[in-house]
Image (cartoon, rainbow, N blue to C red):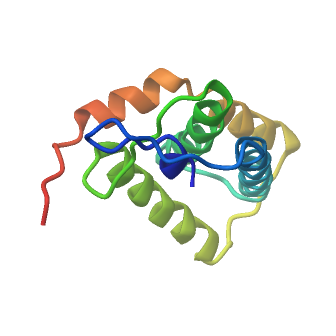
Amino acid sequence: MWRAFTYEDPSGTKITFDPQLRPELMRRAATAEGKIESLIVKLATERELTPDEIRTLGLFRQAYQRLREAIRNGDRFDWTRNSREYLLYNQLSSRVAHMIDRENTRRQTSSTKAGEQLHQIAAMAPEAWDEVVTSLPAATAP
């Protein structure tokens, strides 16, 4: 919805929306981000994660932050099916879904390890997202 809110067609015409839509979208984005944070805490505290899984969760978290920040700042959010960002988000979504769905046979043995994992996930910087996006091949139209 935020993409539609900020869309301008090639002629420069902008679609107008109810002014209350932006705060509502901000609320929704913050709620979604909070749910992702909760999921990440659950995974970090219940499982022994691999370095790749920690990176995946950190980048997935960044995707939700990007959306919320775009709404907060009034920035465009042009993740379309042919964009690198959209491709990365879909890759991360499927990896996280796989983590959730897999059998949880490796329980955490200490709260210290859980805290370390959560710290590593939260420490994933926005620049890491940019690096991964840049490294992806340009998407092509089908």
Question: In the rendered view, would you say 89 is above or below 107?
Answer: above
Q: Position of residue 133 (x, y in %)?
A: 33, 36
Q: Position of residue 78 (x, y in %)?
A: 39, 42
Q: Quadrant of the N terminus?
A: bottom right
Q: In percent of the image, x 58 and y 41: which residue is there?
A: 67
Viewer-side residue, 52 vs 126: 126
In the image, 135 versus 101, the foreground residue is 135
Image: 128 above or below 96? above
Image quadrant in which you'd find residue 70: top right
Quadrant location, the C terminus: bottom left
- Left or right: where does residue 108 sit relative to residue 78? right
Q: Residue at x 60, y 76 (%)?
A: 101
Q: How many marks?
A: 0
Tell which of 116 and 76 is nearer to you.
Answer: 76
Q: Position of residue 97 (x, y in %)?
A: 55, 69
Query: Residue placed at 31% from the left, 58% from the top?
Result: 81
